[in-house]
Image (spheres, coloured by chain):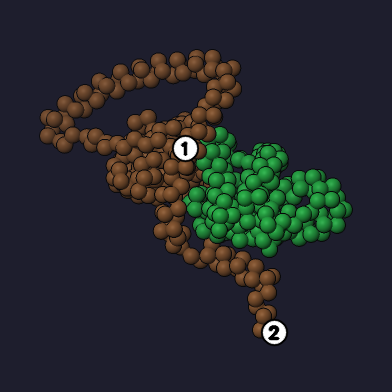
Amino acid sequence: MNRKLATSIIVIFVALIQTAFFSAIFKSGIVPDLVLAIVIFWVARYGKNRTLPWIVFFGLALDLLLFEKIGTNVLTYLIVALAISALAKRFLVSQKVPRTLFILFLVVLGTLMQKILMAAFLHPFDLAEYFKGAGWSYVIQGKIIFQILLNLAGTMIVIFPIAKLEKYTVFYSREVSLKR
Amino acid sequence: MTSGYFFRRPIKIILIILLFLAVILFLPGKFFDPVRLVFLEVAYPFQKVFYLAGEKISSAFGFVGSISDMREENEKLIIENNTLAAKVAGLEVQKKENDEFREQLKLLPRNVYDLESAWIIGRNPNNPGSWILVDKGSRSGIKKGMPVIAFEGILVGLVDEVLPDQSKIILLSDSASLVNAMDMESGSKGIVRGEYGLGILLDMLSHTEAVNGGDTVVTSGLSGSIPKGLLVGKIQHVRLSDDKLFQQAAVAPRIKYTDLNMIFIIK
């Protein structure tokens, strides 16, 4: 119970940092996606079966804090987690690629998937018009590159404290090591 | 097919995805408002602390970064200030004459706005031109639809959602924002709507009206809930709508929404 509470507090704390703290610092509309970093880390380290309920909780917290339709962030991060899980099983377990490089690749892929899925869920009925206007300007102004770089930096920063806090979370007692 | 077939994990995951997809597409947005209300009321003090802490850090770094621009901006502001001072002097005379005429004709005095000041305690991190969160709510008499201004006369948005201690304001550049407005120079009336948080468009202008770049856009007061004469911005350029039936004008807002720290809600 205590581990569940600690994990819940971590989830809400990270969601608040991303939505409140970073929105005051990064006013360009591009903030480091700490939630994506943690989703990638947890899914790659513990597998999707144990992390999916917490990813749903992450998504719910973001939907509530960002005044978005319930399910928008849930579905986005759920789909990203499933894709990452499939790739992690294929490449990380077989150790075909360097681990760190692969995590960074997952962050890039996760960023692109997250942006496209969020656009699709937020503008389901005028998606073409959105991509023609705001979506396209996001790409040609280089904002997507900046977003990827910020997410990579955020991942590097957040992974170490999250790994340290692992012993307080629900994942600790049944940790699956994916070390080389 | 075994009885446990529908309980296998991939099926469960697919069902969860379909459920949330249905919730996003078909359930009205207000369905989960009670849940949101409770969550946000609990998160409110942490939200405020985190945002204000971020603001302090942002201000400190912003000051250092803007030193080189300050001299140029300072000169620009001095010129603008002097121009405005001259205009204000002329307008004060007109105001005095107007008040005298109103008194002579026994007209009711102009409305004085009942303003509620509020600090900004949050904004959409993914789209700062979309909405902001302020620290006043229903306990301070705030209601949905109230207009929100900055600097006593510049319209920035409308109250969209109200909680006991905080309110969500949609900015004029948000896609859901629609305000009746007019071109002050030509008198042409239209509707100001937002474009995905990136800009403002004055739409539905009659193509027979002479609307030009540099014209001032103000609220027309037609909706009733928004007073007439609130400044929206200046027209940048004019074009025909896709269906060629109306003119559309891109409007540059008078202020940068990300620079706002405090706003006023007209009750």
> Residue B130 location, x and y as percent?
50, 44
Q: Say what secondary structure mark 1 lies in.
A: helix
* Res B98 → quadrant: top left
Mark 1 is surrounded, within 10 Å at the Cα level, by few (under 14), some (14 to 19) or many (20 or more) other residues, namely some
Hey, which quadrant is residue A54 in on the image? bottom right
Labelled disc at residue B2: 2
What is the chain letter for disc 1?
B
Determine whether B95 is above or below A65 in the image: above
**Residue at the image position 62 percent from the left and 50 percent from the top:** A168
Residue at x 64% of width, y 60% of height:
A52
Q: Which chain is brown?
A: B
- Number of numbered tags placed on the structure image: 2
Query: Residue beneath label 1, please?
Result: B49
* Residue A72 in sight in this render: no
Disc 2 secondary structure class: loop
Above/below status of B54 relative to A78? above
Q: Colour of chain A?
A: green
Q: Is residue B254 above or below residue A19?
A: above
Viewer-proximal residue among B227 and B124: B124
Of the image marks 2 and 1, the number of the one nearer the N terminus:
2
Residue B45 is left or right of residue B3, and the answer is left
Could you tell me the amino acid type at mark 1?
A: Val
Q: Is residue B115 above or below residue B207?
A: above
Choose between B11 and B28: the one closer to the eye: B11
- In the image, B223: left or right of A53? left
